[in-house]
Each structure stands twice: as structure tokens, then as C-alpha cells.
């Protein structure tokens, strides 16, 4: 597996060979436009792996943020009874849904 940097013109002229190298050897081809990286040619399987990694990273970031929010809320609401906390949560969900409905209906 290697990486090659080529101009857009060269990529156009040799697309077949670069595509074959990406598929058969896992090579990556960085395609430049005006001497700046513009795109990368990789195999579809490599693309799928990258997309999966991006999705997992986004999910992990979301879960980490959610955990931090939950910890903050637990600290802030330490003095509430479970019933009071439930009532506040239900009210917050209703308010959020009402705001979402208002925004969705206005578009």
C-alpha cells in the first residue's frame, strides 16, 4: 500500500492504472489541482472503512458529550426527589417537541 501524488491531468490520463492500483494493492492517489490536494482516489473497501470509522468516532463523541451532560445534570439536581426530576424531564421533552414542531412547521 502506497500513496502517490499526481496532477488532475495525470490522474485523468492514467485513471485506469491508478484505479487498478487502488483496488488491487490498496494504493491511494492524491489528486492535486493547481498544486493543492483536491481529492483522493482509494478503493471502495477503503472508503467504506473510513466512513465506518467516521461514524464510530461521531457516535463516541456524542456519547461522551451525553455522559458529561448527564453528570452535570446529576450534580445540579442532587437535591431533587426522583418524582421532581421526572416531572422536570417530562416538561423539558414537551417544550423541546413544541419548539421542534414550531421550527419544522415554519420551514
Image (cartoon, grey):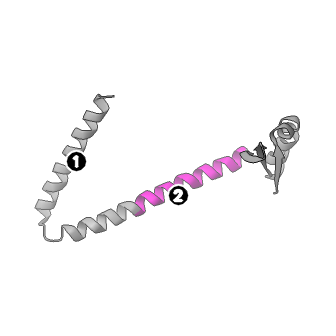
Question: Which residue is pictured at 28% across the width and 67% down the height?
Answer: 72
Q: Which residue is located at x 30 percent, y 64 percent? A: 70
Q: Nearer the viewer, residue 77 or 24?
A: 77
Instruction: State how far apart marks 1 and 2 are (Cα).
Output: 27 Å
Q: Is residue 68 above or below residue 3?
A: below
Q: Which residue is mark 2?
A: 57
Q: Residue at x 25, y 34 (%)?
A: 102
Q: Nearer the viewer, residue 34 or 15?
A: 34
- Marking on residue 93: 1
Whether residue 101 is in magenta: the answer is: no
Prevailing secondary structure class for the magenta stretch in the rendered image:
helix
Residue at image location 31% in from the left, 32% down from the top: 104
| Relative to 76, 24 lies left or right | right
Could you say where residue 48 lies in the image, as x and y percent from the top left? 64, 47
Q: Position of residue 97 (x, y in %)?
A: 24, 41
Mark yes or no: residue 21 visible. Answer: yes
User: Where's the N terminus, which quadrant?
Assistant: bottom right
Q: Is residue 58 above or below residue 81?
A: above
Amino acid at each position: 500500500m502506497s500513496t502517490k501524488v499526481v496532477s488532475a491531468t495525470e490522474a485523468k490520463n492514467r485513471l485506469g492504472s491508478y484505479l487498478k492500483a487502488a483496488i488491487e494493492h490498496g494504493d491511494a492517489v492524491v489528486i492535486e489541482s493547481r498544486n493543492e490536494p483536491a481529492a483522493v482516489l482509494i478503493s471502495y473497501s477503503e472508503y467504506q472503512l473510513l466512513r465506518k470509522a467516521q461514524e464510530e468516532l461521531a457516535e463516541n463523541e456524542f456519547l461522551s458529550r451525553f455522559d458529561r451532560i448527564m453528570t452535570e445534570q446529576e450534580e445540579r439536581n442532587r437535591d431533587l426527589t426522583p418524582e421532581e426530576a421526572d416531572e422536570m424531564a417530562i416538561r423539558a421533552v414537551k417544550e423541546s417537541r413544541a419548539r421542534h414542531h414550531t421550527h419544522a412547521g415554519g420551514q
